[in-house]
Amino acid sequence: MTTTKRDFQTTDYGAVPDGVTLSTGATQQAIDAAEAVALFLLRGFTDGGGLLEIPCGAACGRRGRAARSVDEEAYPSLWSRVAGIEMDWHSPLLNICGQQHAAITGEGLINGQGEYWWHKYWGADRLGGMRKEYTAKGLHWAVDYDCKRPRNVLVLNSSDIRLEGLTLIRSGFWNVHICYSERVKADGLTIKDNPGPSSDGIDIDSSSHVLVENCYIDCNDDNLCVKSGRDSDGLRVNRPAEHIVIRNCETGCGGGITIGSETSGGVRDVEIYNIKARGTDNGLRLKSARVRGGLMENIRFHHIEMIDVPHPFSFQLNWNPSYSYAKLPDDWEGEIPAHWKALAEPVLPPERSIPEFQRHRNLRCDREERFTGRNR
């Protein structure tokens, strides 16, 4: 009987576990080796699969001891959807793209060391950077798409995927993005230490049969978010987010559990329950804009405990106009990138642009005496 090697370590392929040395190539070689074994095993030669272990400090990309030393060239461009449109974007730290029956598990820490990207976006004082420059030109709607801050983890065009037990911190942009995928489970994730802009916890984007449970999420934007594309590009793709369960999770700082603002493909059959929100800005937030379109239906939200949550329910269907409505300044004479054109393309006929929300069940908010005492 032939014995097939199934366990791999990135250090066997040259990764240096010092948290400084660029180890992307070594990590990818180890992934390729594990994948080759997994494919061999799946074809029926034996049972099981390939397992890749990343030792502590064996980084996938060059972060450096100071965030300012990040080399943007260490992040190759990857065609995916981000913030509602399809375009090239800097690759996340870890990617599961076009795969089946794959998992990222363990007690490991994924540290995006996002300070470089946060400073690039809004400056060290949160008042400058590209955000200030673009806003002054009437281009607030374009700055996220030009800054291209990397996500921590991406699951794209994949099925039967499991993310379990991980801790994710300091992401340059979103922490976990599940896009165009089905049968995905995120269990026991801890997402924290994310003071940067748009550092969403988990974004479920035009995906189906997704389960998120037993997670703790503290961030600077949406803790958990369900999305389905933006404006004309989202309507072109026309892929809903559906059959989603979010349960037994706790949220700290952040925007809350959100449907939108990218709603163009529609959202349906979502159940959210057994949630503890502590100091979160919102409990449940529905947000969209008058250029998004899409039908949101059968959203069930129940058994929620909220403490120090100023807005138990928030409905913003004309959300953030300077970001939501992409229009070039009348005196613009510069280059018009392809993703700007996608953002600014009008929705036709205009009636397709109106988002619709209907048949939401079990929306209830109780104020109990036990919530009025000193909070944790």
Image (tube, rainbow, N blue to C red):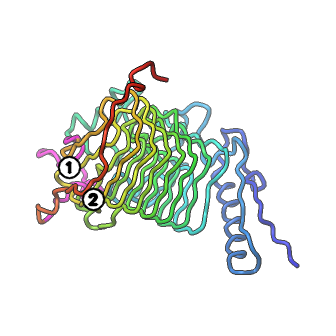
Q: Quadrant of residue 118?
A: top left
Is residue 119 visible to us here? no
Q: Quadrant of the N terminus?
A: bottom right
Residue linked to disc 2 = 297
On the image, the x and y values in percent for residue 218 come to 47, 35
In this view, the residue in front, 172 or 328, is 172
Q: Name the main secondary structure of what is drawn in magenta.
A: loop
Q: Amino acid at mark 1?
A: Ala
In this view, the residue in front, 148 or 74, is 148
Magenta stretch bounds: 320-348
Q: Is residue 7 above or below residue 61?
A: below
Residue linked to disc 1 = 289
Q: Quadrant of residue 136?
A: top left
On the image, the x and y values in percent for residue 208 come to 42, 64
Q: Residue at x 27, y 67 (%)?
A: 236
Q: Amino acid at mark 2?
A: Glu
> How far apart in space, not on screen, are marks 1 and 2 (Cα)?
16 Å
Q: Is residue 246 above or below residue 347?
A: above
